[in-house]
Amino acid sequence: MASFNRVILMGNLTRDIEPKHLQSGTAVTDIGLAVNDRRKTAAGEWVDETTFVDITLWGRTAEVASEYLSKGSPVLIEGRLKLDQWEKDGQKHSRLRVTGERMQMLGGRSGGGGGGGGRPRAEQRDESEYSQPAGHTDPAGGGGGGNDEEEIPF
């Protein structure tokens, strides 16, 4: 049976980014993303719901995120779901998280992160989108995809 594991999320960072490097030199960072949703209840009232998602970024994507983003920055993440499982004190635990494979910084130069000071727009756009290298694999055994798509200007 075929399967498909793809996640696209847009939200705001819940904390500042703390980059780390593995012994191999590969950059890795865990970020928190708050994704807001607004829906109407049966009574006709609007209710805001926030979902908090844990995301792991690898390689150049992790480096760029830690350099340009901070708490509250808007960002779009594309990746895949991964189930982490571990045992602690005899109890089994699990957590669903996202392995980010592509990141797009959002927002303008002056507000909400994703900017880059007074750099020209074209230069900013080139640095704002990164993917994992084609041959990159994270310790969990996933693969990365290259960024062979043309950029869609919208």
Image: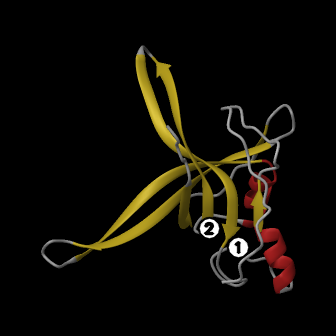
- Residue in the foreground of this view, choosing between 68 and 55: 55
| Residue lying furthest top | 90
**Distance between mark 2 and mark 1 Cα atoms:** 8 Å
Residue 59, image x and y in percent?
79, 48
Q: Earlier in the sequence, mark 2 or mark 1?
A: 2
Residue displayed at 84% across by 31% down:
23
Identify the residue shown where x is 68% and y is 38%.
142
Q: Is residue 90 above or below residue 84?
A: above
Which of the 4 image quarters holds residue 135?
top right
Which of the colour schemes (rainbow, by chain, secondary structure, one colour) is used?
secondary structure
The answer to whether residue 46 is visible is yes
Lateral position of residue 68 relative to residue 17, left or right:
right
Q: Is residue 131 above or below residue 43?
A: above
Labels 2 & 1 near each other (Cβ < 8 A): yes
Q: Is residue 119 left or right of residue 29?
A: right
Judged from the image, the secondary structure of the residue bearing numbered disc 2 is strand
Secondary structure of residue under mark 1? loop
| Side of 86 relative to 31 (left or right) | left
- Viewer-proximal residue among 144 and 114: 144
Q: Please state which amino acid type lies under the numbered disc 2.
A: Val
Q: How many marks?
A: 2
Q: Quadrant of residue 93?
A: top left
Mark 2 neighbour class, 10 Å CA radius: few under 14, some 14 to 19, many 20 or more:
many
Q: Identity of the amino acid at label 1? A: Gly
- Residue bearing mark 1: 114
| In this view, 117 is above or below 63 | below
Where is residue 124 shown, x and y percent of the image?
82, 77
- The residue shown at (29%, 72%) is 39
Q: Residue at x 70, y 85 (%)?
A: 110
At which x and y percent is residue 107? 64, 79
Q: Which mark is residue 75?
A: 2
